[in-house]
Image (cartoon, rainbow, N blue to C red):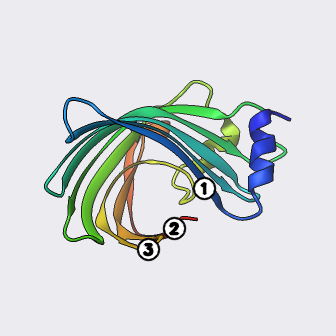
Amino acid sequence: MGLHKIVVCLLTMSLTSVNAQEENGLFSNYLKYKQSKNLTSIPNVGGYVYYNNGLNLEKNGLTIGLKTGIIQKWISSPFSPNTPDLNPYIGGELSYRLNQNLTIFANGQYLFKTENESDATNYLYKSPFFPQSEINAGLRATFDEHLFEAGIKQIYNPQFSSSSSESRVYGKWSMSF
């Protein structure tokens, strides 16, 4: 059993998300470089880790962000291979803060197909639990330690060299502690 699976077992009592990040101002207070590692684990399904490197330009409530990195995905199945799938990706976001709690946004990301992608994880495509190649637009609200997000997303399928896409209306709620 790999070290990452031991860590996942310890964290999968419920849907778990762990974030670690570092942010540095570059040339001014408006341009920032950000590195982060975001782990999401889903009991009896699997999980993924985003390893991000990003550049954000922030001024007067407007944020333009570009990011790139690797997404490590794995599934909880006795038939899955021992090695996780690694997908390089690139993404971006444009957002505007309407007030202290409310933000309107549009973002997207593209996951590149990898050679180590296994047949066992092919079903992850279009799964709402795992990252996809997609574009989103919506509204984000923060209240105390709660984040609410609602919008529409268009999911694309570069993993199977298909031009088909699927639209979804989605909502998300997360809480920090």
From the image, which quarter does the C terminus lie in? bottom right
The quarter holding residue 78 reads top right
Q: Earlier in the sequence, mark 3 or mark 1?
A: 1
Between label 3 and label 1, give the one nearer the viewer. 3
Q: Give amino acid for label 2.
A: Ser
Residue 127 image offset from top left, x and y in percent: 56, 56
- Camera-nearest residue between 18 and 117: 18
Q: Mark 1 points at which residue?
A: 17
Task: Find the distance from the CA under tag 3 to the CA under tag 1.
Answer: 18 Å
Helix, strand or loop status at disc 1: strand
Apparent side of residue 84 relative to residue 34 in the rendered image (left or right): right
Q: Which amino acid does label 1 sit on?
A: Ser
The residue drawn where x is 19% and y is 42% is 30
Answer yes or no: is residue 76 visible: no
Please name which of the two marks, 3 or 2, marks the residue nearer to the observer: 3
- State how far apart marks 3 and 2 are (Cα): 11 Å
Give left or right: position of 113 versus 84. Answer: left
Judge from the rendering whether residue 158 lies leftward or rightward of residue 20; answer left or right: left
The residue at which mark 2 appears reads as: 174
Label ID, residue 144: 3
Mark 3 or mark 2, which has the lower sequence index?
A: 3
Which SS class for mark 3? Answer: loop
Q: What is the three-letter code of the residue carrying label 3?
A: Asp
